[in-house]
């Protein structure tokens, strides 16, 4: 009998009860069963849990995912030890986090702050780049909560050392899904999804045979402009784009949610995480963000995962896997009080970024890296007021059209494609092409 999951243990306990009765012995009482179940579950699946805290590196600790990860860790005292913290430019917040968690390793983009950070963390703290953190002996679990391409190298470093990675930084799989999943496989490392949609699919698949999946269904809220007439999209401002109706997230992902590029990224991410081809990944609009995603199986049965929109749930799931840990956050779902759950088809004409992402994901090779890089540059340009919201799709389209791709790229070829797309999108000449495309289409 396999003791590797909860259902195996349940079956074992049932057999034990039946066996005891058959032998004329006293079976365990109904009251004792839950405690026995928990004890066995811990013993069979998490032998190290009670012994010592798990060493964690939190990359992107100053961002939305990073801060919520530290919140989850705070709520589970004794379970984790924060070995490493890495931020970007917000060194003030990183200093506060260092003072609280006293990591062994610390890093941020502002290297001139390195003495202040070390002083805040304590004398034994060392300054170390994210790749070194991810590969460090005391780190068992890496939470990649950086944004853009920054998480790729440390994620690979962790996987190549056989460590578990809780992955939020979706661009990592969009850019280099084949390379990253191959590294995980070759080194027996585990990739745990943090994105709420992928966490939902992951949870639906616990105890299921992957060969029984017929399709994955990702839900999309529609972002900040879902109720705005399409003709008004040319004039929206960055501040308006940052008002997401259901989720509170970092700036880049919030803009990507408004263009639905984020959903396209998620389709590519799902393709690699669950090894399901793009044509069997469907997007469904769902404005309430309560059904986080679904899996349809070969017998027609559909499983979904539901919950209030709160990233602490998927983060906790990824950190504590395979155990479910009791918590008061997020608040419990009350379906009876909910008026309706709405679903509909996405309009690819209104959301050209979604179409471009699905096309790039289907083409594969270096195209998704170009997609991610061009989008990162174009979103920054939009945030600085240099281009319009609708130009984001035009800029990405221009880069994808001009790219001469490679079908099964190495990591170096992916990084070259990424660099090429950034350079192409940032150049004034490409801006000219974007405007020309805009004129052509109007
Ligand atoms: N937020 C969510 O609810 C959510 C949900 C699902 C998936 N995700 C994905 O998770 C990732 C993080 O999202 P987020 O919303 O947490 O973003 P965020 O709030 O912008 O945080 C990004 C983090 O990465 C750091 N960072 C940015 N550029 C960096 C660089 N070049 N080198 C090192 N560190 C860098 C930032 O540092 P500073 O802030 O110090 O500059 C910050 O700590 C994204 O890929 C996003 O798509 C987020």
Image (tube, rainbow, N blue to C red):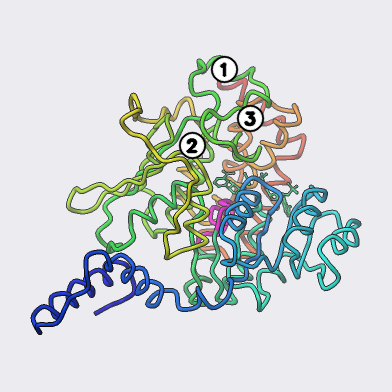
Label at residue 242: 3
Residue 85 higher or lower than 392, as above or below: below
Q: Is residue 277 left or right of residue 229?
A: left
| Beta carbon at label 2 within 8 Å of ligand 1 | no
Q: Which residues are magenta?
A: 167-177
- Give the total number of marks visible in the rendering: 3
Secondary structure type for disc 3: loop
Q: Quadrant of residue 415?
A: bottom right
Q: Which mark is residue 442?
A: 1
User: Which residue is outermost to the bottom?
Assistant: 23
Image height of 335 relative to 58, above or below? above
Picture disc at residue 229? none
Coordinates of residue 107 in the picture (x, y in percent)? 78, 61
Badge 3: how crowded within 10 Å, few (<14), some, or many (20+)? many
Q: Earlier in the sequence, mark 1 or mark 3?
A: 3
State the SS at label 1.
loop
Q: Nearer the viewer, residue 15 or 322?
A: 15
């Amino acid at each position: 009998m396999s003791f590797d999951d909860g259902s195996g243990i349940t079956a074992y306990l049932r057999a034990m009860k039946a066996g005891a009765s058959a032998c004329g012995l006293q079976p365990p009482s109904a009251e004792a069963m839950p405690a026995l179940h928990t004890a066995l579950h811990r013993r069979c699946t998490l032998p190290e849990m009670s012994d010592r805290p798990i060493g964690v590196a939190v990359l992107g600790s100053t961002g939305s995912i990073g801060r919520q990860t530290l919140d989850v860790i705070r709520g589970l005292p004794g379970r984790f030890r924060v070995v490493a913290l890495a931020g970007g430019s917000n060194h003030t917040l990183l200093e506060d986090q260092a003072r609280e968690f006293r990591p062994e390793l610390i890093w941020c983009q502002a290297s001139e702050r390195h003495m202040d950070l070390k002083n805040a963390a304590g004398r034994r703290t060392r300054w170390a780049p994210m790749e070194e953190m991810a590969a460090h002996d005391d780190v068992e679990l890496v939470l990649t909560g950086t944004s853009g391409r920054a998480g790729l190298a440390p994620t690979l470093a962790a996987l190549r050392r056989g460590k578990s990675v809780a992955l939020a930084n979706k661009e990592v799989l969009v850019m280099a899904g084949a390379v990253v999943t191959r590294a995980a496989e070759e080194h027996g490392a585990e990739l745990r999804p943090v994105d709420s949609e992928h966490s939902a699919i992951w949870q639906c698949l616990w105890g299921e045979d992957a060969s029984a999946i017929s399709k994955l269904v990702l839900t999309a809220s529609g972002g900040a402009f879902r109720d705005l007439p399409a003709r008004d999209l040319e004039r929206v401002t960055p501040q308006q784009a940052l008002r997401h109706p259901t989720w509170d997230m970092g700036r880049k992902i919030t803009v990507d949610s408004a263009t639905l590029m984020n959903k396209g990224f998620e389709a590519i991410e799902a393709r690699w995480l669950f090894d399901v081809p793009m044509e069997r990944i469907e997007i469904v609009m769902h404005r309430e963000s309560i059904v986080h995603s679904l899996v349809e199986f070969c017998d027609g049965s559909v499983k979904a995962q539901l919950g209030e929109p709160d990233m602490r749930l998927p983060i906790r799931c990824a950190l504590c896997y395979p155990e479910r840990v009791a918590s008061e956050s997020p608040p419990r779902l009350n379906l009876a009080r909910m008026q309706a759950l709405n679903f509909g088809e996405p309009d690819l004409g209104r959301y050209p970024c979604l179409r471009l992402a699905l096309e790039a994901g289907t083409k594969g090779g270096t195209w998704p890296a170009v997609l991610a890089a061009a989008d990162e540059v174009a979103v920054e340009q939009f945030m600085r007021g240099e281009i319009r919201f609708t130009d984001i799709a035009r800029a990405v389209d221009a880069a994808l059209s001009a790219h001469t791709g490679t079908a099964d790229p190495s990591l170096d070829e992916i990084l070259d494609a990424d660099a090429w797309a950034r350079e192409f999108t940032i150049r004034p000449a490409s801006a000219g092409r974007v405007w020309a495309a805009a004129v052509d289409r109007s």
